Image (cartoon, rainbow, N blue to C red):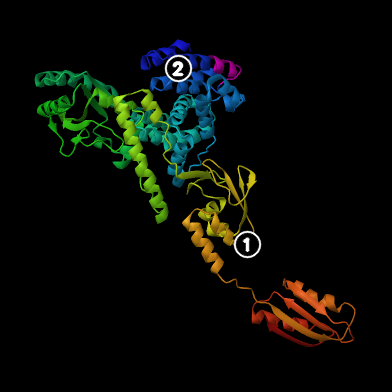
């Protein structure tokens, strides 16, 4: 854990940037002191974790502030270091990054499939700077590598969160190899039986596959030579266990149908050589129809570029080849910002779909520009500046007390939130708590707020709400609730003439209470033959009749009548 392990990587990426170097150096010392008495569940010193996080960030070619924040990312939460101490020592930018990561770690993944997409968006919205996400990803990568030391239930939750939230996030940022690594690291905790099955069914073939690859490699080299292609290198890669499993599920666990268990990867210098190499391979072995993919001319939506083909190779064995330039390869594996896009959200209300769509359009515009810049100036200041984007400036993401994410337009209030949860909650809303503090109903919500709505039965919405609410949905519901005529439940009035006696009033009222009927009001005149009037909460005539019969039996009642009012 020498500082130089990280500063050498940084200095290669940013030659001559001495201010970054000194920032990293002081962050290294600061974190070492702050975490000095802490241990990880593995028994290692805690500093190992922040060191590995910072090292990963340097490896991803991130700037000095980000690498420094990697060292400091757990100091606020785990060491109670006051934020001011960080800004005093490292400036507001580093503090912003550290606080961003701290905020993200408060989000809890509850495993509701519906909110996974919102949670990913919320992370992007909350971080307001993609560098915060990169720190979180580096942090998660190291946590996954040391997951075995945690209790079983925690392992499962963290692994699920990694596979559902962080791996897809990495994919959308164009970080293929990180996404694959995160998926593979979580796989044993999520699918232990499947892992055993795959091991049992692939065990014998593993060695065999390696020998096979070694056998065909010289054949390819020769043929490429003949075609005038000089590959930078030829790699063979075994398919990742997580992606193998996904594919097996699609093919009824039939391993015979998986052609890319092992793929050969040919890395060349220029675009033209990719196509020449493809021709050379097809010259050697016959391609499987329908398996030739030109992702160079037509890149995948996340920016992935490569040629793919599967051929009947030696022994008629289907084998996949991937051909790409070194530039494409690096972007495919580690591209810090490709463009990502969101699936259209099924089953949403039309107005939400429109709002989401426009945010996504802007998002892909911003990110394709990022991708362009990254190609031209990887690791440059322009590129780092471009990461400070606020993609979802017109959306906010707030949490229910159960940790579910609710996506609302910016400027929304607790009333908008209440109606989004349920119109009954909206109609009966009387107050709201944001992060456990009572706020007025016209409070403007902010991303990350945790909301609780206070309700009261039979409460009606107020027309003053129309002045501050933001969503059309709430407006529509408030209008319809205000126009609804309130139906006052019916009551029954009994009038009795009686001969007075001790306990008469009590006996009359006990008829109602024995039948669990609320007496709304009761009055009696004060004379020898008192008139008693009872208004009771009885809505139906048949019920009113039943009670009438029971009242008739009360001693002293001489005349009785009733009417529904
Ligand atoms: Mn951490």
Q: Residue at 29%, 27% (x, y): give it.
A: 375
Check the picture and name the quadrant holding the C terminus. Answer: bottom right
Residue 522 drawn at (x, y percent): 79, 76
Q: Residue at 9%, 19% (x, y): give it.
A: 226
Q: Residue at 39%, 51% (x, y): give it.
A: 353
Residue 293 drawn at (x, y percent): 20, 36
Q: What is the number of the mark on residue 459?
A: 1
Q: Secondary structure at mark 1?
A: loop
Give the magenta part as a residue range. 29-39
- Quadrant housing residue 520: bottom right
Which mark is nearer the camera, 1 or 2? 2
* Near-viewer residue (81 or 40): 81
Q: Secondary structure at mark 2?
A: helix
Residue 116 drawn at (x, y percent): 44, 42
Q: What is the number of the mark on residue 34?
A: none
Q: What is the number of the mark on residue 20?
A: 2
Q: Tag count in the figure?
A: 2
Residue 302 drawn at (x, y percent): 31, 36
* Near-viewer residue (185 or 443): 443
Residue 201 seen by the camera: no
């Amino acid at each position: 854990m020498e500082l130089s392990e990280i500063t050498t990587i940084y200095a290669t990426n940013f030659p001559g940037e001495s201010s970054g170097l000194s920032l990293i150096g002081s962050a290294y010392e600061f974190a070492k002191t702050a975490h000095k008495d802490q241990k990880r569940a593995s028994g290692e010193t805690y500093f190992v974790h922040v060191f590995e996080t910072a090292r990963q960030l340097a490896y991803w070619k991130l700037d000095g502030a980000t690498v420094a924040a990697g060292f400091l990312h757990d100091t606020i939460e785990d060491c109670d270091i006051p934020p001011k101490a960080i800004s005093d020592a490292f400036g507001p930018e580093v503090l912003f990054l550290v606080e961003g990561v701290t905020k993200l770690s408060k989000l809890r993944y509850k495993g509701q499939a519906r909110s996974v997409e919102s949670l990913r968006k919320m992370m992007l919205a909350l971080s307001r700077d993609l560098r915060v996400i990169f720190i979180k990803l580096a942090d998660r990568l190291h946590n996954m590598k040391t997951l075995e030391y945690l209790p079983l239930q925690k392992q499962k939750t963290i692994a699920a969160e990694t596979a559902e939230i962080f791996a897809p996030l990495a994919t959308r940022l164009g970080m293929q190899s990180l996404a694959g690594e995160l998926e593979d690291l979580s796989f044993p905790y999520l699918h232990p039986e499947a892992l055993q099955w795959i091991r049992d069914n692939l065990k014998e073939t593993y060695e065999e596959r390696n020998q096979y690859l070694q056998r065909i490699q010289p054949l390819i080299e020769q043929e490429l030579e003949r075609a005038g292609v000089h590959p930078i290198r030829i790699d063979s890669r075994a398919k990742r266990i997580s992606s193998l499993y996904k594919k097996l599920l699609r093919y009824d666990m039939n391993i015979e149908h998986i052609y890319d268990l092992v793929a050969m990867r040919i890395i060349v210098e220029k675009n033209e050589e990719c196509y020449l190499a493809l021709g050379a391979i097809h010259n050697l072995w016959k391609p499987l129809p329908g398996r030739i993919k030109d992702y160079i001319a037509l890149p995948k939506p996340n920016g992935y570029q490569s040629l793919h083909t599967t051929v009947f190779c030696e022994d008629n064995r289907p084998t996949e080849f991937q051909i790409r330039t070194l530039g494409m390869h690096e972007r495919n594996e580690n591209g810090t910002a490709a463009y990502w896009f969101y699936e259209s959200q099924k089953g949403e209300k039309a107005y939400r779909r429109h709002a989401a769509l426009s945010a996504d359009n802007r998002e892909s515009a911003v990110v394709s520009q990022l991708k362009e810049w990254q190609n031209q100036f990887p690791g440059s200041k322009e590129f780092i500046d471009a990461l400070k984007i606020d993609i979802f400036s017109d959306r906010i993401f707030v949490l229910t007390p159960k940790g579910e994410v609710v996506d609302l337009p910016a400027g929304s209030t607790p009333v908008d939130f209440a109606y989004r949860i349920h119109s009954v909650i909206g109609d009966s809303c009387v107050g709201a708590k944001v992060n456990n503090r009572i706020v007025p109903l016209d409070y403007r919500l902010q991303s990350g707020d945790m909301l609780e709505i206070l309700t009261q039965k039979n409460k009606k919405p107020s027309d003053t709400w129309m002045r501050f609410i933001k969503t059309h949905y709430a407006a529509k519901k408030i209008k319809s609730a205000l126009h609804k005529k309130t139906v006052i439940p019916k009551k029954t009035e009994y009038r009795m003439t009686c001969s007075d006696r001790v306990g008469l009033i009590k006996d009359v009222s006990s008829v109602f209470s024995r039948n669990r009927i609320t007496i709304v009001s009761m009055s009696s005149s004060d004379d020898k033959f008192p008139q008693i009037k009872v208004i009771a909460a009885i809505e139906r005539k048949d019920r009113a009749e039943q009670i009438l019969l029971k009242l008739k039996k009360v001693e002293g009642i001489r005349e009785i009548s009733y009417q529904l009012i």
